[in-house]
Amino acid sequence: MKIILTNEVSGLGIAGDVVEVRDGYARNYLLPRGFAIRWTRGGEKDVEQIRRARKIREISTIEQANDVKAQLEGTKVRLKVRAGDGGRLFGSVTPGDIATAVKSAGGPDVDKRRIELRTPIKTLGAHEVSVRLHSEVVAKVGVEVQPA
């Protein structure tokens, strides 16, 4: 099935790309979550709008991405969450929580979709999170999860 991506999907492409995927993957995952729309001839007009919107909010150059990386890696991010006995959290820390904590710590505004968590953060302590700023630039941010 041919689809137009509306969001970045790791391993598949970025917003505005027209890609061919298996029917079940498109119908059961990409389309219901709003990551893609079906490709049509009229949809080609939407591709240009999506690309223009992406270009506005995207970090365009590697130098710009390296500047943001330096700001991020110099920021001390502390996140206060509810935790039970033994340091286990009630729930987990989401990329949205991390983006908010980075902004409140005085760091740059980071899109939550660019934050990559290898495993869910469910314990107190120090954790390392990757932020993909550009196709070639990844920042490592230290997040200290503390009890509220």
Image: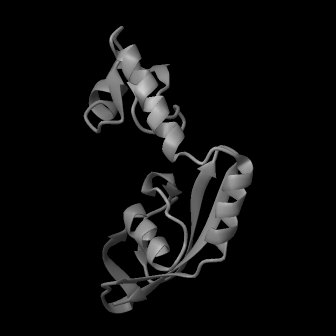
Q: Quadrant of residue 46?
A: top left
Residue sitting at 48 percent across and 30 percent down? 51
Q: Percent position (x, y) of residue 90?
A: 28, 78
Model colouring = one colour
Q: Position of residue 125 (x, y in %)?
A: 50, 84
The residue lying toward the viewer, choosing from 123 and 140, is: 140
Q: Where is 18 relative to 115, above or below?
A: above
Give the image location of residue 16, x and y in percent: 47, 28
Q: Residue at x 72, y 58 (%)?
A: 66
143 left or right of 30 in image: right
The residue shown at (36%, 82%) is: 88
Q: Nearer the viewer, residue 117 or 63?
A: 63
Q: Is residue 145 above or below residue 46?
A: below
The single residue placed furthest to the left in the displayed view is 32
Which quarter of the image is occupied by the N terminus? top left
Residue depicted at x 64% and y 66%: 140
> Where is residue 7, by image quadrant?
top left
Residue closest to the far right: 63
Residue 21 left/right relative to 55: left
Q: Give percent across and percent down for residue 13.
A: 53, 32
Say whether residue 1 is visible: no
For residue 127, above or below residue 35: below
Residue 102 seen in this snapshot: yes
> What is the number of callouts on the image?
0
In the rendered image, which quarter contains the C terminus?
bottom left
Instruction: Tell me: 52 left or right of 137.
Output: left
